[in-house]
Amino acid sequence: MNSPDPFAAALDTIADPATGQGLIASGRAAPPRVNMADRTASVILDVTGLSADDRAAIERAIRGKLIGLDGLRDVRIAMTAEKTARKLIVVGSGKGGVGKSTVSANIAIALKRLGMKVGLVDADIYGPSQARLMASEGQRPEAEGQRLLPIATRFGVPMLSMAHLVKPGQAIAWRGPMAGNALGQLIDADWGDVEILIVDLPPGTGDVQLSLIQKHKPAGAIIVSTPQDLALIDATRAIDLFQQATVPIVGVVENMAGYACPHCGEVSDPFGAGGAEAAAAELEVPFIGRVPLEIAIRKASDAGQPPAASGEAVAQPFLDIAGALMGWLNAKASPKF
Ligand SMILES: Nc1ncnc2c1ncn2[C@@H]1O[C@H](COP(=O)(O)OP(=O)(O)OP(=O)(O)O)[C@@H](O)[C@H]1O
């Protein structure tokens, strides 16, 4: 058998897009195993964290460098990836209209601003609103093989929503199993190097939520509630669902708390105050933030300009919640991995 060195050297002239080093120097590829009897080489390539484009470019480059070298006719490339460390954080609520979608989108953007690689899935199949919130309405995701490619947004958070798969305004009246399959496609899309996937669940505690939780094993759940009694009773039900499914609760977010009058600045509490915090304490789950009821939040959200992306004070509650989530993830990670 010939020495594999010239082949290894050729492989190492290809730069790893992640580090800029040669593929062998960076540990992406082992020296090729060359079989001169049938003039083929095998290359094992670790593609962890690479985009589909980068993977395809490297594959082309490897073939380009090796085929013909010392009479080599063919190269087999085996791609391996470490099991992704990506974590799913689901955002749920006991009932609709409490601002779960608004909170999910803005947490995702705030996490991005804090330096995480984050993606957003709109699993609210019956009323998908993330495409509007993230200004990606009317776009269609492409697919590579069986996998969808998430849509880039101007906030640096790639996303996928059922709204991207159906025509605008088309009612989505799917039954459980179909809905479950569609959701699976969104979650199992090609998320590249995304570390955290924020999943905006449909409101309530039905089959779709349960099967998603069972199938995709989220790392944690955030519950959104308004301070009202009724919303809190529903939120308690949502917490129960996650606890039964052994999904750890990251914490409760109180939305639409304390209304600041845009004219006189007086703060009033149309839905009461502190109810979600008190309920969280009673249920012994963390309370991780309060978002005020602000016209600026609704206007910015409706205009596809999520408040968390702004440099204004309106972003702060979301940055605080994202910080609490990061703290929770770090605390969870430190003893184990
Ligand atoms: N803190 C807030 N201040 C002002 N308006 C808000 C706030 N949070 C959400 N809203 C507004 O309330 C409405 C409902 O919010 P959103 O769509 O996020 O709720 P949801 O719980 O996801 O609803 P559904 O479950 O029905 O999809 C939207 O018009 C949104 O802009």
Image (spheres, rainbow, N blue to C red):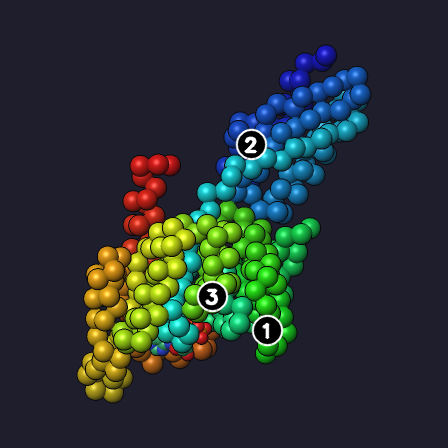
Crowding at mark 2 (Cα within 10 Å: few <14, some 14-19, many 20+): many
Residue at image point 34% right, 81% down: 295
Q: Residue flagged by tag 2: what amino acid is it?
A: Arg
Please give the residue where the numbered disc 3 appears in the rendered image. 206
Q: Residue flagged by tag 1: what amino acid is it?
A: Ala
Camera-near label (2 vs 1) is 1
Residue 214, which numbered label? none
Q: Earlier in the sequence, mark 2 or mark 1?
A: 2
The reply to whether callout 2 and callout 1 are in contact (CB within 8 Å) is no
- Where's residue 67, x and y in %? 75, 29
Above or below: residue 70 compared with residue 47: above
Crowding at mark 1 (Cα within 10 Å: few <14, some 14-19, many 20+): few
- Where's residue 278, x and y in %? 21, 66
Q: Give the SS element for disc 2.
A: loop
Q: Which one is nearer the viewer's eye here, 230 or 200?
A: 230
The reply to whether callout 1 and callout 3 are in contact (CB within 8 Å) is no
Please give the residue where the numbered disc 2 appears in the rendered image. 28
- In screen coordinates, is 148 left or right of 282? right
Q: Which one is nearer the viewer's eye here, 168 or 40?
A: 168
Camera-near label (2 vs 3) is 3
Can residue 161 be spotted in the picture? yes
Please give the residue where the numbered disc 1 appears in the rendered image. 173
Quadrant assignment for ligand 1: bottom left
